[in-house]
Image (tube, rainbow, N blue to C red):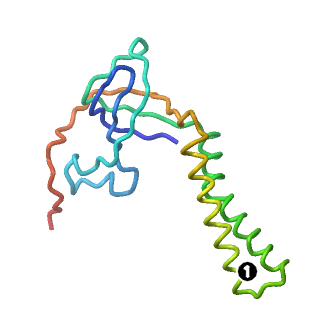
């Protein structure tokens, strides 16, 4: 997965990047460039490998294998646990409504476990590799979003 953004702050070996929108509205010319920026993230970089300045546009990527693992953990495991919860309710001879309740309890517990796993067990956050650095040539101070009709 590849994304890009504008460098807003440099602190030692970390840079703060304000990401560009990756949706269809990112390519519209109706809004000013400042409205095309979304959330901020922090990236590690080696100042000896490349020079990065505030205002540069950086492109960074997350390895596909890591993206697949994250997607499986967040999207597939909860669905599997919903089915398991429903199966447990059915196995215990509960009614269909109670089995559905068991499935939502399984879903909730799965999200709770994923949250706790992310907060306390995962020591290394997902690292993204900076692949390209460009000078920003656009004026990003326009902040109104009005299209001409």
Q: Is residue 62 left or right of residue 5?
A: right
**Res 91 quadrant in image:** bottom right
Image coords of residue 69 (percent x, y):
65, 45
Q: Residue at x 20, y 37 (%)?
A: 138
Q: Name the residue under label 1.
A: 99
At mark 1, the secondary structure is: helix
Residues 21 and 108: in front is: 108
Q: Is residue 12 left or right of residue 92?
A: left
Q: Which residue is drawn at 66% across and 79% down?
A: 101
Q: Circle 1: is it few (<14), some (14-19), or many (20+) Cα within 10 Å?
A: many
Q: Which residue is drawn at 43% across and 23% down?
A: 45
Residues 7 and 140: in front is: 7
Q: Which residue is outermost to the top?
A: 48
**Res 80 quadrant in image:** bottom right
Image coords of residue 105 (percent x, y):
65, 71
Q: In this view, does 89 lie to the left or right of 148?
A: right
Q: Residue at x 22, y 32 (%)?
A: 137
Quadrant of the rendering where the C terminus is positioned: bottom left
Q: Is residue 79 above or below residue 125?
A: below
Q: In this view, does 98 lie above or below 40?
A: below
Residues 115 and 142: in front is: 115
**In this figure, what is the number of numbered marks?**
1
Q: Is residue 41 left or right of residue 107?
A: left
Residues 139 and 128: in front is: 128
Image coords of residue 40 (percent x, y):
34, 42
Image coords of residue 133 (percent x, y):
36, 26
**Res 108 quadrant in image:** bottom right
């Amino acid at each position: 997965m590849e994304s890009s953004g504008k460098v807003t702050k440099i602190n030692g070996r970390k840079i703060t990047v304000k990401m560009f929108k990756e949706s269809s509205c990112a390519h519209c010319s109706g809004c000013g460039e400042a409205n095309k920026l979304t959330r901020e993230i922090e990236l590690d970089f080696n100042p000896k490998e490349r020079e990065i300045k505030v205002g540069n546009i950086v492109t960074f990527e997350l390895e596909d294998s890591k993206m697949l693992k994250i997607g499986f953990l967040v999207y597939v495991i909860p669905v599997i646990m919903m089915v398991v919860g429903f199966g447990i309710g059915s196995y215990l001879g509960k009614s269909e409504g109670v089995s559905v309740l068991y499935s939502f309890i399984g879903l909730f517990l799965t999200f709770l476990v994923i949250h706790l796993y992310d907060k306390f067990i995962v020591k290394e956050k997902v690292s993204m590799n900076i692949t390209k650095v460009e000078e920003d040539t656009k004026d990003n101070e326009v902040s109104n979003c009005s299209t001409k009709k």
